[in-house]
Structure formats: C-alpha cells, structure tokens
Amino acid sequence: MTALQPARREPPAGDGPPGTADRTVRRIPFPVVDEITRHCLTDDEPETVHIEVHLPGRPDPDRLRAAFREALCRHPRILMRQAPHRWWRRRYEWELTGVPDVDPVVFPPPGPDALERARERALADCPPLDASPPVRLEVVERGPDGEGSEDGASADGNGNGNGNGNGNGNGGTVLLVTINHTALDGPACLRVLATAAQLYGGADNSPAPPPVRAPGVPMGGASQDTPPLGGHRLARPVRIAAERGPRSAGSEGGSSARGNGMLITELPVPARPPRVDGVAAFTVNDQLLVATCLMVARWNHVHGRPSAPVVVTMPVDDRPRGTDMPIGNGTRLVSVGFGPEEERDAALLTADPPDPAAVARLLRRTAARTRSLKAAPGSQLGLGAALLTAPVLPVGARGVLARALRTAAAPLASTTLLSNIGRIPYPLDFGDAGRPTAVWFSAPARMPRGLTVTTVSVGGRVQLALRWSHALLDDEAGARLGALFARSLAATSWTPGAGEDRTGRTDHTDHTDHPDDTGRTDRTGRTDRMDGTDRTDGTDGTDGTDSTDATDRPEGTAP
C-alpha cells in the first residue's frame, strides 16, 4: 500500500493532488448493477446507503474537509456524475470529473436533535446523480452531555427519529455518510473514508491482513439434504408479514407509507464452540443468517403467516481492501435458502425460545450452505441482468423492460437481505479525534423485500441496523421486529458444558425470551451500552473467527 501524507492546509480543500484540476473529464458506461438500479429508481424509496461513524473527539473542520476532498481525488472513480442522456442512447454513462462539483462535507448546526435530523436526511434525501460526487458527509457534533443524541436508536424518513444508540455521554462527533447506491456501495465509500482518516491523522490506515485458516471441513459437515451449492430450491419465498397500525395505514395521502424506517442498536457477539483442529463448526456470519431466518419464521408464525421457505440474500465482497480497491458497486449477491429441511423443525424453531437442538441442526446446515456459496464463482446479478443491460435496445426501452420484469418477478424475490460487514478492516484513526467507538451501516429496504439487516462488529459487539419500508411496517412494528432479532441471535449462542458436542450442537435453554438479556433492547429500540468499545482495530469479529484473531475479509458487505 502506498504511504499517504497528512492532509495539507494549503492549497485550499478540494484542489487534490497536483494536476488534479487539469484532468480531462472522461466517460465510462454504467456497469450492470448501476444500470439495473438506475432503471428502477423511485421517489418513494430513495436508494441510499447510510454509514455512521462515532468518534470520541472532534476533528478540526478545515483539516477534515481538506482530508476528505483529497481522499476523493486519490480515488477518482468516486468523483463521477451521470452524463446527460436521451432515451434513445444505447448506454447510461458516468462522467469522471477529477475534482468535486460540489462540497460534499456539511456541518449541520449542533443541537439536541442534530443527529436525529441527519439520520432522517440519510433515509430520505439521496445525493443527486448529476453532481460529483454522489456522496454526502455530515459532521454532527455531540454536546458534552450527549447533546445531539439520546440513548436508543430509531429513525425514519418522516421525522420520527428517537436517538442514536450510542449515548455514552462523552460528547464527540458523528460522521454520517449518505451514498447514492446507484453509484457505489458502502465498502467502497468506507475505503475512501479510511484514506481520509490517514490524510487527516497521519497514522497508517492500511487494512490488517486476513488470518491464516486451517484447511478442512468441520466435523458434522454438510447434511445430506443440503441443496447443491447451498442455494434454495425453486419455491416462492415467504414475505415478512406486514404490520401497519390504523394511524399509519389511514394517514392523509398515505405519506407515512413512504420511505424507510430504521432501528440501530448493538448486541453481544454470540458465543461459538471451540475450534476442532483449527476449524470452526460455524461462523458468526452463519449465526446471523440463522437469526434472520428465526426472526422471519417467528414473526410470521405469530401473525398467522407461512414461516417457510425463507430465502436470505447475502452480498459477498471479494475485492481487495488496499488503496487499489475498485470503487463502485462491487458485491455479488447469493441466496441462502431455508426451506424443506427447516419445515420438519418448524414447530421447534418458532417456539419461544426456539429448541436448542433444532437451532444447532440449522446452524450446521447453514454453515455447509454458505461455505459452498462463497467458494463458487458467480457474477454480480446473474446472466439475466447481463442480457438485460446489453446495449442492443435504447436505454429507455431497456428501462421499461427492466421495471416490468422486476414487477413480474416480485413474488420470487428473496425474503430479506442480510449484509454482514464483519470487522472493519481499517483502524479509521482520525488522530486527535480518535478511533471509532461505534459504526453502523444500513442498506436500502425497497419493496418487495421491504426489509434489510446490516451488521458490523466493533469492540466485541454486533452493531445492528434494521431498516424497513413503511409500506410494510410502521415504526412500532419495526422496533418489535428488532427486539425479536436480538432474541433470535441470542438463541444461536453456544454455552459450554451444556450438552455441546463436537459439531456445535447445544442442548441448553438460554434467556432468549428477554430482550434486556441480549443487548438491552426494548420495544422502542432503546439500547444501553454493555461494554466500553473504544476502537475498531480488527480484534472483534463477526466473520466467524475467534475474538483474538486478526481482521478477516468481510463475508458479506453492504450493497
């Protein structure tokens, strides 16, 4: 990785490296993912990715602005805008501008609701595609007594936020990044943010190397009824049962059904059994997948809806994490199916609490599925998307066809999306402002899925962002669904000496029916910090490694 120098105070912020301003604007065609997303944009559900980085100190505004804008110039692929187009053109094109068209760094006025308002903007106000870069960084100051936020974490796009979930009362700053998902994804923007941290603080922000893994398959391996490559069989996936109260359902003009709601909280990393010959029986990523399946099944069971088959879309990111990381939408999507095998244990898995032996069987099957899925090669959206974006028809005609096919295929869309970032691969050391105490990502939750689960690991805790479409759930229902996820994740935790065998099976009952035992989450999404997380240095992990391992490459990433 090339060493980067601390950010300069001169020349003025935004000039970038010498010669940047003289670069010629060039055009590149939209990749497949960008074009499909561009075809399906709607005003009701903005396609935003939100990143929230909590720092214990306060960065210098001028230095931070200079560092971030120079980081953009060091990664010129992020400095892009959509070129003017007509419907008869064969392609959408990005214009790489070399320097920003607009200042992407904003310092909103401080106040007790500053973070709440910034979150609302992140869900409802998407950076435009016609100005470079399609990213906004809001620097939100928190008062010495936690002003600018409250304990708890719930927000939506209609002004109903309820705090930030990191109420440590020590002040500090929140860097809140909003990304237009048509242009790039969360991990790519995080790479740029790591460069900005290095430019600002001068410390090395190189990604830690992945740990050395023992070869082999854990004992108890794949079940004989595990589908090939872990994929789901051809069956119509279940949908999350909708729940919207009379007030939201009957509001004038249906405004409450627009946009997304969001709950953010933090939970303990669930325990795993010891490794056998250096091989883990299952990873925390597998536990998160199982928790998502349990959440859906138990929620639908209570609402009298089918509980299976559940299909979870999982983004996988194979890109390098150094300064040469490709910027854009670089993840590929795989589907993890939970169907006929789980139906035999349906009554056990939807019980409160779920049966530990049934959960252990589900964990083993899930581990086998995800291993084969991640090992198999694949394109980002499959052959169909590549054919749909081939420059044969004009983009206007392809757009009509893409939207029609999306509507027709809606019943076959996966139940939900789980994006597990894992451990942050960079220190994100902002010098005098410190290293992050908490980091959250959230992915857009458009219908027909209407629900996304995004997780990050910081300081031995799982930072959870649950995001839902208001066409599916109101905010009270979203908060209860988040509490159910906390209980479901706790149900996957291994307890030593309680009937554990060498395949990770547990025969215990833990306190999975009390949200306060799993991250102190209540029905409003409120959370109390359980530990003193103070850095993201690659020692905590949701990628399936022990907590003392080095940083691993994320198994799944934000879209």
Image: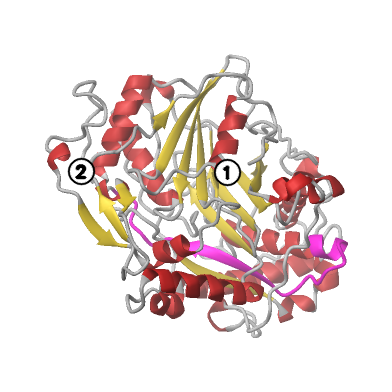
Q: Dot 1, how many residues are within 10 Å of its Cα: few (below 14), some (14-19), or many (20+)?
A: many
Residue 42, disc: none
Q: Which residue is mark 1?
A: 123
Residue 32's quadrant in the figure?
A: bottom left
Q: Badges 2 and 1: C-beta atoms under 8 Å apart?
A: no
Q: Nearer the viewer, residue 193 or 109?
A: 109
Q: Nearer the viewer, residue 438 or 62?
A: 62
Region in magenta: 298-322
Q: Residue furthest top?
A: 144
Q: CA distance from mark 2 to mark 1?
A: 35 Å
Under mark 1, the amino acid is Leu
The vertical placement of 307 against 510, above or below, is below
Q: Position of residue 180 (x, y in %)?
A: 45, 49
Q: Which residue is mark 2?
A: 2
Q: Residue at x 39, y 42 (%)?
A: 426
The vertical placement of 105 against 27, above or below, is above
Q: Of the residues under marks 2 and 1, which one precedes in the sequence?
A: 2
The vertical placement of 263 against 530, above or below, is below
Q: Position of residue 183 (x, y in %)?
A: 39, 53
Q: Nearer the viewer, residue 441 or 545?
A: 441
